[in-house]
Amino acid sequence: MRATSKAFRLHVGFFGRRNVGKSSLLNAITEQKVSIVSAVAGTTTDPVEKPMELHDIGPILFVDTAGVDDIGALGTQRIEKTRQVIKRSDVGVLVAESGVWTDFEEKLLAELRALKIPVLVALNKADLHRPTPEQLSRFAQEKLPYVELVATTGEGAAAFRQKLLEIAPADSAISPVILRDLAGPNETAVLVIPCDREAPMGRILQVQAQCIRDVLDGNAICVAVSGAAGLKSALENLKTPPKIVVTDSQAFEQVSRVTPESVPLTSFSILMSRLKGDLTVQATAAVVVDSLRPGDRVLVAESCSHHPIGEDIGRVKIPRWLQKYIGGELQFDYAIGRDFPKDLSPYKLVIHCGACMWNRQEMLSRIAECERQGVPITNYGMVIAFSMGILDRALAPFPEALAAFQEARKELSAAGVSTSPTNHVS
């Protein structure tokens, strides 16, 4: 009933200086007037998104951006918005005027490459100028794909689509695996979906809907229940034990008591770490909780903005559980949406939501930034499971991540940090 979520679309960002034809190119590729086009430099101020289906690639999201040479105070803010789009792009289209290559193009290319984002150079206004021999030589030498086009007439649009198809990630047209590999054909996965204020009657959260669809796509059987009591009834009614139980992280403690040890157990949030982030990196970072001390600062990051409820998981429950675990007060700061501190040095740990509304590239960019600054980043589900003493069990379906977590904990213990606190949260 709904179109493909933006989180599951290939993100293609258009970047370049003002007035090089980014908006005209987007309109030509989509064959629609998506972006406003004007001879006045700086017409595009905020990112403009256009979802569509592209043959042989599948669901795609084109994003037009402000020029990276924008000026003034507002221009600086627009450039920052453009840089946020770079971090979530699966493919970067560097739009330049044919025959012209400035420091701005050079810096854009370096920034995209630093994030390991495939780049397609679109040399626009090819009716006015030809690429220089130096440009063509460099493109060939560096195996940098390019296409010549005239965005205002649509000339070269077909060649652009073909080049995009060639450099798009090989798995971009493949439906991402969330859970179906852990269940298996004709096996049963039980999803514990609480009906609470965050998911009131009549709706379920997007990640839960995605998991249901994924189980069905794997020709497995999906049983959805509400809370630990519903799980208990389902386990009693099933003729054979389920292949896996997946729970909302907030119900980890109650669900772990009901689920037999022989049945694998994990959470939606941990599944999102595997799908959208780096499960091994985020699992390893969870051990840092053992080294937290009263007064330490922790950053809680949420990918989507929402009005906090009374018992909000990121603002109330996780701080409460962590502070009980360490036996003292911590200082918590919050980053909402795409706003993220440039300087992470004050923080001992970053705790991120599952990023179900983001594509994987954006989450990986955020993880890379944390690693660059030497600040560990984990996620909601792993912190909750850790504070309850059941992260080993929650990671058991993922042997590589479990082994990395256990090794990191041994190293922390060898360094003299206690890894057996007396107060697991319950």
Image (cartoon, helix red, strand yellow):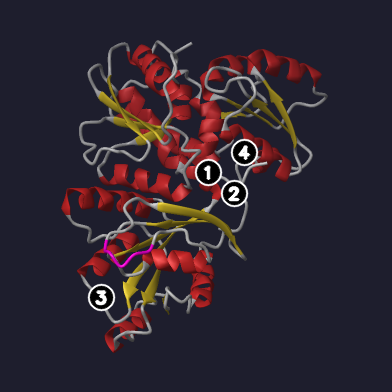
- Residue lying at the far bottom in this picture: please name it: 133
Rendering quarter of residue 35: bottom left
Q: Amino acid at mark 1?
A: Leu
- Tell me if 325 is positioned left or right of 132 in this view: right
Q: Which mark is residue 176?
A: 2
Rendering quarter of residue 393: top right
- Tell me if 147 is positioned left or right of 16 in this view: right
Magenta part, dominant SS: loop
Residue at the (62%, 38%) spot, across then down: 210
Earlier-in-chain disc, 1 versus 3? 3
Q: Can you give x and y, in whole percent of width and height, for residue 419 in the image?
A: 37, 22
Q: Amino acid at mark 3?
A: Trp
Please tell me whether mark 2 sits on a helix, a strand or a loop: loop
Crowd class of label 3 (few under 14; some 14 to 19; many from 20; radius 10 Å): some
Earlier-in-chain disc, 3 versus 4? 3
- Tell me if 247 is positioned left or right of 220 in this view: left
Q: How many marks?
A: 4
Crowd class of label 1 (few under 14; some 14 to 19; many from 20; radius 10 Å): many
Q: Amino acid at mark 2?
A: Pro
Please tell me whether mark 3 sits on a helix, a strand or a loop: loop
Residues at marks 1 and 4, CA–CA distance in whole angstroms: 12 Å
Q: Can you give x and y, in whole percent of width and height, for residue 41 in the image?
A: 26, 63
- Camera-near label (3 vs 2) is 3
User: Which residues make up the magenta segment?
Assistant: 37-41
Front-most of residues 152 and 229: 152
Q: Which residue is mark 3?
A: 101
Earlier-in-chain disc, 1 versus 2? 2
Crowd class of label 4 (few under 14; some 14 to 19; many from 20; radius 10 Å): some
Q: Which residue is mark 1?
A: 275
Position above or below: 320 against 221: above
Residues at marks 3 and 4, CA–CA distance in whole angstroms: 44 Å
Can residue 373 be seen in this snapshot?
Answer: yes
